[in-house]
Amino acid sequence: QVQLVESGGGLVQAGGSLTLSCAASGSIFRLGVMGWYRQVPGKQRELVATITSGGNTNYADSVKGRFTISRDNAKKTVYLQMNSLKAEDTAVYYCNVNDLTTYGTRGYWGQGTQVTVSS
């Protein structure tokens, strides 16, 4: 099993910054794509950003130019630097990690961390 521990959420004013972290531990074979998603009540969880093991990134249009995803493979940690935050960025943010096992890819979710942006 793989455990994910998220940190870094909180309350920030519009225009401010936050950095989220998600550390993976446990029986990890080989980490593949890691990413961040977010969800607000009554809406589906949506992709924010992903990063491959080689460092290729993908962002939702709504966060391009403001958010930066990165990873430290040695620490098995993925980060999300969020700048120029807007009220509409308010959501619960979840990290997602894919473990490339010999039996196939297994996906894991973090517990979620609340980000609240006050306008």
Image: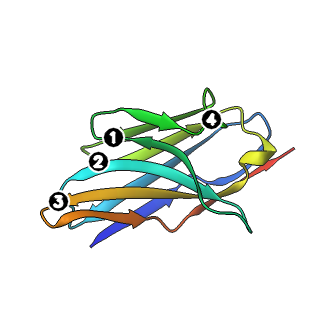
**Distance of label 3 from label 4 (alpha carbons):** 32 Å
| Disc nearer the start of the sequence (3/4) | 3
Q: Which residue is mark 2?
A: 75
Callout 1: 10 Å neighbours few (<14), some, many (20+)?
Answer: some
Residue 118, x across and y down, in percent: 83, 48
Q: Are marks 4 and 2 in contact (CB under 8 Å)?
A: no
Amino acid type at mark 1: Thr
Q: Nearer the viewer, residue 53 or 27?
A: 53
| Horizontal relation, residue 76 to residue 38: left or right | left
For the point 61% across and 56% down, the residue is 38
Residue 90, x across and y down, in percent: 73, 52
* Helix, strand or loop at mark 4: loop
**Distance of label 2 from label 3 (alpha carbons):** 14 Å
Amino acid type at mark 4: Asp
Q: Going by the picture, which residue comes out furthest to the right?
A: 119
Callout 3: 10 Å neighbours few (<14), some, many (20+)?
Answer: few
Q: Which residue is mark 1?
A: 52
For the point 69% across and 57% down, the residue is 91
* Helix, strand or loop at mark 3: loop
Callout 4: 10 Å neighbours few (<14), some, many (20+)?
Answer: few
Please state, as top left, top right, bottom left or bottom right, where the C terminus lies in the image: top right
Amino acid type at mark 3: Phe
| Disc nearer the start of the sequence (1/2) | 1
Q: Are marks 3 and 1 in contact (CB under 8 Å)?
A: no
| Disc nearer the start of the sequence (4/2) | 4
> Is residue 111 shown above or below 94?
below
| Horizontal relation, residue 27 to residue 91: left or right | left
Say which of marks 3 and 1 sits in front. 1
Confirm whether residue 63 shows in the render: yes
